[in-house]
Amino acid sequence: MKLTFTLIALCSYCLLNAQKAGTLDSSFGVDGKVITPANGLLNKIALQSDGKIIGAGAGNFDSQPPFLIIRYNHNGSIDSSFGNSGISGIGVQLSDVLSLAILPDDAIIALGRVSAYVNITKFKKDGTVDSSFGNDGTVITIAGAFDMPTDVVIQTDNKIVVGGYIINEPNENRQLLLIRYMPDGSLDNSFGNNGIVILGAVSGGELPAFYSLNALALQPNGQILASVYLTKGAVYRFNTDGSQDKTFGNNGTAYFQTKDNSVVNFQAYGLVVQPDGRIIGGGSSTKAGGNPLHYMAAARLNSNGTIDSTFGNSGLQHVLFGNNPSEGTGILLQKDGKLIVTGRTHPENESSSNLALIRFSPFGILDSSFGNNGQAITEVGNIAVGNSSLLQKNGQILLGGYSDTLGSSFVVARYNNDDKTKRQIIIQKIKHYIATHNDAQATTLNNVSIYPNPAQNILHVEGLAANAKLTVVDFNGNVIVSRELSPVPSNTGVVSNGYDLNVSSLHAGNYLLKIETNGEVVTRQFVKE
């Protein structure tokens, strides 16, 4: 009973001290924000495996090159061990860094342009250029008249996929562009035409002048998804060889359409793929004759490219920030299925703007438990724009962009969150409390041991006292197995042969074994294979 009350008190303490989802994390930077006077714009943020934050874009910080890659520590301070006092890229020709991707060894692929052509440069984990990649660390690819790369992703085999579009002569249509590189920077000849896929504008009254690629995403089977800017926001799917998957949507094109006729245009600037294969786009919608005109929005497709009518309003959901317009630039998928759209909001006909986030339930309903009735707004100077967002391993939200504060500055803000990872942290605290408080007082059970661990069918428990009770609990607090052992006469009170607990019916995973006897309790963690 004492243990139960202790656990309840501990859970209450953890929950009361957990910050509300959607509020700024005061332990990061100054009041949750990091502002770096860079005389430039932050376009993309990414995470290395140790949780350090890479921010990249264009600027001129401390007389450095016209593009910037900066690494921040967990608390938001600049990491002076990275590159040259925290800044990387000196001597590399890039107009600016448009997108980033992190390799499994924490090396960095930076995507940009040189003149009118695609440039990718590889940096080692510490920010130095990897000269073994391409030509002294850099690869320049000429695909069309004027190449505009927009996004880069890394496949599971470490091949690099770049997406963008080609601007041709004024009276010619734009074209979509995909390029795939081998891990060493050479073009992948098994993809498209010698590593390059160029796709002409679709027919059917689309506007070729605005035809472009907004974002890339990878499916588990290696297929490539591309969010495409058309008069109606669309998604193309490409096979692993670069050919367009004509079984997807309508002959290869899936539209984020909705039965809400007042929404005349939805464009996805971020893509995520759910574990069940459904595809979600986050971005902006336009309402015919609406005031305001632009809204943050999200839309969902089934895995075959058809509209998922169970999401939002017939497949699409948009959100008002009072009477102010808003634009979404990215979307995040939490482990619990909730969705966060990030970007900015601003008063109508005014130049000011603020960082903005909204959170939806897995079914596209605004989540009132997040921020202020599902919304979070952060003011940074007169103008602040959120360009890139991501979820940290502990579930916290990072939003990167720029502000007019201190000239033109890189901005990174971190927000508290209540994704499943927060719950796992609380469980870990409870486990630690049990291990450090109960065992010390349980003199009768000091010699209890369990093996094998991991276990397959039988978990042997050694050193049990008479009248012991064994309880197996999963990490959600559910009791899976409970056994009360019969008294065994013994001068020592110990069952010398121990007890074989049958765990064959348990699903693979982590469990806690609680052992009780004579008012004492100890716990042991084990893994079921």
Image (cartoon, helix red, strand yellow):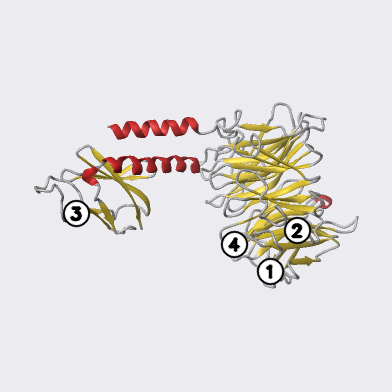
* Nearer to me, 301 or 116: 116
In front: label 1 or label 2: 2
Residue labelled with disc 1: 191
Q: CA distance from mark 4 to mark 1?
A: 24 Å
Which mark, by number, is residue 105? 4
The mark that comes first in sequence, 3 or 2, is 2
Q: Which residue is mark 2?
A: 89
Labels 3 & 2 near each other (Cβ < 8 A): no
Disc 2 residue type? Gly
Tag 1: amino acid: Phe
Is 528 positioned to the left or the right of 265 in the image? left
Within 10 Å of disc 4 (Cα), the crowding (few <14, some 14-19, many 20+) is: few
- Gap in Å between the C-alphas at discs 3 and 1? 61 Å
Task: Find numbered disc 3 in the image and state the secondary structure of the residue it sits on.
Answer: loop
User: In terms of depth relative to the viewer, which is nearer, 259 or 189?
Assistant: 189
Describe residue 230's horizontal placement relative to residue 4 as left or right. Answer: right
Q: Which mark is residue 498?
A: 3
- Image x and y of residue 267, in percent: 72, 44
**Which amino acid does the dot numbered 4 rest on?**
Asp
Determine the residue positioned at 81% across, 55% down: 65
Name the N-terminal-most of marks 2 and 4. 2
Q: Quadrant of the C terminus?
A: bottom left
